[in-house]
Image (cartoon, helix red, strand yellow):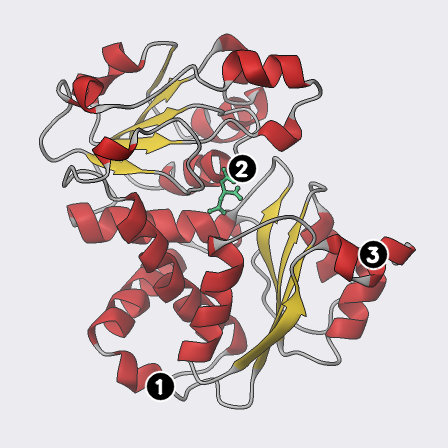
Amino acid sequence: MRHLIDITDLSVQEVDELIATAEDIIQDPAKYAEVCRHKKLATLFFEPSTRTRLSFEAAMLDLGGSTLGFSEAQSSSAAKGETVGDTVRVVGGYADIIAMRHPKEGAPLAATQVSTVPVINAGDGGHNHPTQTLTDLLTIHKERGSLSGFTIGCCGDLKFGRTVHSLVNALSRYSGIRFVFISPPELKIPLYLKENTIEPNGLPYAETESLEDAMPDLDILYMTRVQRERFFNEADYLRLRDTYILDPAKLAAAKLDMRILHPLPRVNEITVDVDKDPRAAYFRQAVYGKFIRMALIMKLLEVQP
Ligand code: NCD
């Protein structure tokens, strides 16, 4: 039985195969409409979500399966003190596969130790978010035709932003990738990612506080929200939240074929008048999220069209 907790649980070949399957689903959705008939997906979300939970549910419905679950810890027995392990053990008796989001780093990994069905990490605290990364990779592949040879700017909250952590782990396995990490000093990329992933892979990278300076070099600009819920005090959040605001004036210095990605939700970091720029890929990215999750569910349930 396979789980997806960390993006590197999948080999590069498996990631490429998931992208190819997602692209095939986009071309011919009817071929996949019944493959998960009588299968059930449980979404156990102990933390807020719009896209991740609903795209998982839409993915399972579009595969002909069905869904059950909860969208806040307060409406589950977690509110009575039940452990994650017990919840997962029980839900495995009702569903064929589980997607779990939890505020504690490592909770989905702990769930795999007792689960009788595949568990997918749908975001664990400030740690990882592998299915957002699959979404991001499909988006880059669809928009730019490749996953190699790009300069990727990651901008915003690189400390608590779990989507950036998983994206760095994934892209560091492709050739010709260069990162530019754009953040205030307080929200820099964690040291463990530099020591365990970036440096051992010999990846060139730069760190800067200036989005303007980085802009002309970038092929992909990955904007992120300052993760308010991970801050220890509100004053720090308020001080840092508007450090970067992407607007049309800043975009004027960008390459014409650059693409702007954002896992969403957006707060202030991209102005709405950027949305109509053809380089703004974030709403298309949200749509791609459903298709790659369809491919992933099929893989973990070992079903084929
Ligand atoms: C991200 C998350 O939850 O980590 N959103 C998402 O899953 N699409 C990013 C965020 O919340 O800022």
Q: Answer with left or right where residue 192 lies relative to residue 285.
A: right
Query: Disc 3 marks which amino acid?
Result: Ala
Closer to the observer: label 3 or label 1?
3
Point out which mark residue 162 bears.
2
Q: Quadrant of the C terminus?
A: bottom left
In the picture, residue 87 is in which quadrant? bottom right
Instruction: Find numbered disc 3 in the image and state the secondary structure of the residue it sits on.
Output: helix
Query: Disc 1 marks which amino acid?
Result: Pro
Q: Please tell me how crowded label 3 is: few (under 14), some (14-19), or many (20+) other residues with Cα within 10 Å.
A: some
- Is the C-beta of the residue carrying label 2 under 8 Å from the nearest atom of ligand 1? yes
Marks 3 and 2 close (CB-CB < 8 Å): no
- Is the C-beta of the residue carrying label 3 under 8 Å from the nearest atom of ligand 1? no
x%, y% of residue 217?
19, 20
- Earlier in the chain: of badge 1 and badge 2, it is 2
Could you tell me how far apart the alpha carbons at marks 3 and 1 are, in whole angstroms? 37 Å
**Residue shown at the point (59%, 18%) measured from the top left:** 237
- Earlier in the chain: of badge 3 and badge 1, it is 3
Residue 252, above or below 78: above
- Earlier in the chain: of badge 3 and badge 2, it is 3
Could you tell me how far apart the alpha carbons at marks 1 and 2 are, in whole angstroms? 33 Å
Q: Quadrant of the N terminus?
A: bottom right
Q: Please tell me how crowded label 2 is: few (under 14), some (14-19), or many (20+) other residues with Cα within 10 Å.
A: many
121 or 303: which is nearer to us?
121
Point out which mark residue 305 bears.
1
Q: Which residue is mark 3?
A: 78
Q: Please tell me how crowded label 1 is: few (under 14), some (14-19), or many (20+) other residues with Cα within 10 Å.
A: few
Instruction: Find numbered disc 2 in the image and state the secondary structure of the residue it sits on.
Output: helix
**Residue shown at the point (43%, 55%) measured from the top left:** 11
Query: Disc 2 marks which amino acid?
Result: Arg
**Residue shown at the point (84%, 62%) measured from the top left:** 77
The answer to whether residue 150 is seen in the rendering is no
